[in-house]
Amino acid sequence: MIAAIFSGALSDQDNSTYLEAIFKCPHCLLYFVGYYSRDYGANTHTFRRSLPRTPLKEDFPLIDLVSERFAEIYNQSVAAEEYGLGDIAGSGYRKALEFLVKDFCISLDPQNAEIIKKKFLKNVIDDHLGDGKLKRVATLTAWLGNDEGHYERRWVDKDLADLKALLALTITFVNEEIQTEQYIQSMQPATPKRLQLKDVES
């Protein structure tokens, strides 16, 4: 189905003439404005953007099993980025990483939950994530995440796209750990029968 157009008008923005058209989405039934730049020579209009934007939310069914807040914070960061708030989005992704790592480590070691909650993220990664790829990629993600909250960047050749790529890798490794543990728990071998004295008597 095509969105229904209700009204349109020309407006001047950024020294350019735009056609603003009001549409109604046939799926969610919400209204939005489409902006089209005008080419006077060809007498055509080219679509440029639409507002308001409604970012799609990403689901993390496995991670939801260990972290109640990660998906919410991550999707808020995506929304900030979609609205052009990249500086805020970077700090949000860094916060999402901290919830992901700490909640995952708490799921592995619930007896030390309060200790893990109070530690700096770097110390949680160093002390509770073993020595595999998850630890290495979480460390890199934390480094770039910290850059997003500081006045000067340490990793000047990396940007928000790199932070998101590393966070995606971290999510992948955490998902693998959770899924592996699920299979281990669901496929425990039957307890072997213990030898009884009568079994060996002749």
Image (cartoon, grey):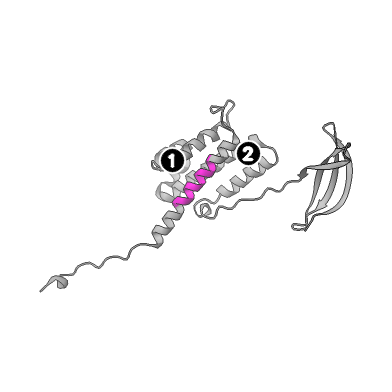
Q: In this view, which residue lies farthest toward the top?
A: 152
In this picture, which residue range is highlighted in magenta?
Answer: 166-177
**Which residue is drawn at the image coordinates 53% and 42% (left, top)?**
167
Residue 92 location (% of width, % of height):
60, 40
Residue identifier under label 1 = 135
Measure how far apart labels 1 and 2 are at the Cα level: 23 Å
Q: Badge 1: few (under 14), some or many (20 or more) residues near its Cα, within 10 Å? A: many
Magenta portion: prevailing SS class: helix
Position of residue 81 in the picture relative to residue 67 (left or right): right
Position of residue 59 in the picture relative to residue 194 (left or right): right
In the image, is residue 4 above or below residue 90?
below
Picture quarter containing residue 35? top right
Q: Badge 2: few (under 14), some or many (20 or more) residues near its Cα, within 10 Å? A: many
In the image, is residue 180 above or below residue 49?
below
Circle on res. 3 = none
Instruction: Quarter of the image for the N terminus: give it.
Output: bottom right
Residue 159 location (% of width, % of height):
59, 33
Front residue (pair 104, 193):
193
Which amino acid type is marked by label 1?
Answer: Lys
Mark 2, secondary structure of its residue = helix
Mark 1, secondary structure of its residue = helix
Position of residue 104 in the picture relative to residue 75 (left or right): left
Which amino acid type is marked by label 2?
Answer: Ala
